[in-house]
Amino acid sequence: MSDTLTHLDQAGAAHMVDVGGKADTRREAVATGRITMTAAAARAIATGAAAKGDVLAVARVAGIMAAKRTSELIPLCHPLPLTRVAIDLAPDADGVTVTATCVTTGKTGVEMEALTAASVALLTIYDMAKAIDRGMTIGDVHLSAKSGGKSGDWRADRD
């Protein structure tokens, strides 16, 4: 892995990286995050009893939509033709763990799409359940794994 910042030119100015010379390869990234909350809020989400409706279904759709719009949110990201976005939501007694998987065949990776998808799914859960618990905490959003491209496969040590 290189220690140079690829989004800065020789003068230190931000620019979009030219990926035109790179080969198209299958690329996949997985990002994970968690929202913790009171047992009452977790129970309402898991049973579909939240006043705003099915929190998990809406969070899943929000995560998918966010992945597709990442290049509009992160200034130097390339728009990518995503071939798959999957949002896994695992509720438990004190929160929900979100895992976002993004796949493309292209010249650049999908790490930012996976991180954006996980983050927006978590924010959506907060928005839909804040009437039950305003003290929910979103955290530990991180890249869990990536594959494809010149740098090959990578997996977080903590997962």
Image: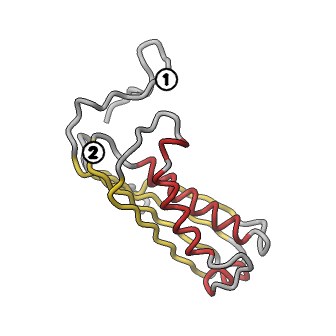
Query: Where is the C terminus found, in terms of image quarters?
Result: bottom left
Relative height, residue 153 to residue 121 (above, below) = above
Give the residue drawn at x 40%, y 58%.
30
In the rendered image, which residue does mark 2 sit on? 106
Q: Is residue 97 left or right of residue 16?
A: right
Q: How is this picture coloured?
A: secondary structure
Q: Amino acid at mark 2?
A: Gly
Q: Which residue is at a point 42% across and 18% down the rendered structure image? A: 9
Residue found at x 47% / y 33%: 76
Q: Is 36 placed above or below 91 here?
A: above
The residue carrying mark 1 is 14
- Mark 2 is surrounded, within 10 Å at the Cα level, by few (under 14), some (14 to 19) or many (20 or more) other residues, namely some
From the viewer's perspective, is residue 43 above or below residue 149?
below
Quadrant in the rendering for residue 6: top left
**What type is the residue that disc 1 sits on?**
Ala
Say which residue appears at 38% left-offset and 49% top-offset: 110
**Rendered location of residue 157, percent (x, y):** 39, 56
> At which x and y percent is residue 48?
64, 84
Q: Position of residue 38 (x, y in %)?
A: 72, 76
